[in-house]
Amino acid sequence: MTNYPVSMARWSAGHPWRAIAGWFLFVVLCLGAGIAVGGNAATSADFGVGEAGRGEAIAREGGLAQRPVERVLIESRQAEPLERAAGAAVAGDVSERMRALPEVRSVAEPVWSKDGRAVRVDVTMKGAELDGKKHVDPLRAQTAAAQKAHPELRVEETGGPSISQGVDKLRGSDLSRTEMIALPITLLTLLLVFRSVAMATVPLLLALSAIVASIGLSMLASHVFPDAGVGTNIILLIGLAVGVDYTLFYLKREREERARSGGELSSRALVEIAAATSGRAVVLSGLAVAVSSATLYLADDVIFSSIATAAILVTLVAVVSSLTVLPALLVKIGARAERRAARKPRKARQQKPVRHNALLRLTARRPGAVLIVATLAMVALAAPLLGLKLTDMGRETHSRQTQSMPTFDRLNAAFPEVKASHQVLVRADAERADEVARTLRSLASDVKDDPGLNGTYTLRGSADHRVTSLELPVPHYVSTKPAQESLQRLRSEYLPSAVRELGGGVDAAVTGDVARYADYPAHQKEKLPLIIGALLLVTFAMTVWAFRSVVLGLVGVVLNLLSAAASLGVLTLTFQNRWAEALLDFQSTGTIGSRVPLFLFVILFGLSMDYQVFVISRIKEAVQRGVPTRQAVLDGVGSSAGVVTSAAFVMVTVFASFVSLHFIEMKQIGFSLAVAVLLDAFVIRVLILPALMLLLGERSWWPSRGPLRAGRSTTERPLANVG
């Protein structure tokens, strides 16, 4: 592990222009290959989970899958009923315009609201449900033309395709704004750390180039792991944080060794020392993030597969950049520093003692008390986690700044039956089609008075007569109790009774909007224990492998669990209640997005290893130099406190910028990660970890008797090459 970073750094330092040119050629090739091949977007089939997914598969087999539907709403501009003749004329005009479009599959007859204040025209588009947003612009253009032709009425369009398109546009705008926030603050932080424009610019440039290369590679990877539309978001979120952090670890070590040598070592020698120490820590940290992220593949879900792929790619690319092009850049920057230093009188080499901050001094004096108080505080923060409620975020939770959402609200107010639907699918032999149809009509009659439904239904059959679909409108949003209870009754009472009536040889399932909403969180809850178990095992194994210590492996697992639980507790306290709505600009749903806890656990476990590896590596170096473990703990934590604090500030800035996004789930992810990094950097690594290691002493390294003390230390090996 040590030799590879040193060998790569030595070559890069010896051939700086080749290394720099090679890196940027690599970035261009990655992006170019990605653009040339193109991305592979996930299809509806990739998203299916649970019974809802099984039902959708049956529907696709029979050609009865949900299709993209846009709805044109026609209303009076005044608070009065719409004149029947005027409404019918506009609806007819809209229908004619839509039928002429090649993107349109069919146009339904106009439907009037019960109070007569509005009329709607349902337009079914060609293609798969998820493809609608790509082809919705011509429909929106015709709606705008109809509005211009009839200014006396309000003519507006909404639906899944137009809202999805609006979500993409608003998300893109939000991400651009977060970059405008995060980049200047990151640059300012780096300027304060290094007091050099060149040294501060390097981490940002490498992070941004790693992001660009990763976006290209993710397009190629999407042909193996289809992109669910979140890959670029994750690359931006994780890439800037780890890219800057890994470079920062490396740069800070080079600066420390330069100051320690008093100008006696060349830039190439300093780069090799940094590679042997911080370079090794970066490799270990990157592998930990990548392996931790890979556990998301166990979720058996296209969204988490996309997240895992994006996180792994951008992390590994960031590691490669820190080991290849960074040493070359450091040598070129260092050469300028050496020329300036040559013109000044050389100062005597002086080893400055490690300064300990107030918290660390307190930990040194009272490790037991600090451990108890800090742990109790983290447990208290984690307590709200007991009341965690997970749900999938329905369309109604989107920001009202999203395109078509205001029309969505008016449409649902006038036509509550379009808020959601159940779709009952039955597959049987073709000769039983009439029998199945009669049974489903009987089922529709049985549920006519169900409080969660509106009493109407639509029955359709496949061309080969093997699949029959019963659609039941639900006049409630998918997240509401009546909608969820109607799904439960349909699955546990009505459909089983119908299946028994049909006897054997049938396959039945309930899918639809409400079923998707219910099944996705249930799927996540089912997979959560498996993924957390794998995550704990990976964290333990990586730590034992890195430091040859079972004790430190167990400590890493416990501390990561404590950090994740505390941050989830703070998230629950903040977003499941209303007290922070004005502060963070959100409207509480009383729940947490079903993807957030799993994402937080996995990414946090990986990022926590950054600090853990970096801090313990410093401690281990001191022990290898013959320093007693107690003093090594204090010196290691003290010497790494500055860079850990700076790195944490960069990560918190990046993650916190996502709180400004308009989408509640992204807000929750950004907020929880920012809180997690703060707690991990300032409580776990500065208080709890050193307190534990001080109390454990030499037992921290069990089963070994401590890191090898004899001979030269890791930091001294590259000095043999100085000449």
Image (cartoon, rainbow, N blue to C red):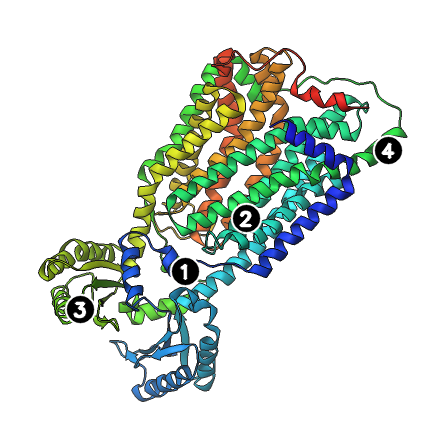
Q: Indicate the secondary structure of the residue bearing disc 1.
A: loop
Specify the amino acid type for callout 2. Answer: Ile
> Alpha-carbon distance for marks 4 and 2?
39 Å
Distance Cα–Cα, label 4 vs label 1: 59 Å
Q: Are marks 3 and 1 in contact (CB under 8 Å)?
A: no
The part of the image, by quadrant, that contains residue 204 is top right
Q: Quick one: quadrant of the C terminus? A: top right
Q: Position of residue 433 (x, y in %)?
A: 17, 70
Q: Amino acid at mark 1?
A: Thr
The picture places residue 592, in percent across and down from the top left corner, at 37, 46
Q: Is residue 66 left or right of residue 439?
A: right
> Is tag 1's residue or tag 2's residue first in the polypeptide sequence?
1
**Amino acid under label 3?**
Gly
Going from N to C along the chain, the mark reached first, 3 or 1, is: 1
Residue 680: give x, y in percent of width and height.
Answer: 50, 31
Q: Which residue is mark 4?
A: 340
Residue 48 appears in the rendering: yes
Mark 4 → mark 3, Cα distance in angstroms: 84 Å
Give SS at disc 3: loop
Whole-Å distance between the Cαs marked 2 and 3?
Answer: 47 Å
| Drawn side of residue 527 relative to residue 702, left or right | left
Q: Mark 4 or mark 1, which has the lower sequence index?
A: 1
Q: Nearer the viewer, mark 4 or mark 1?
A: 1
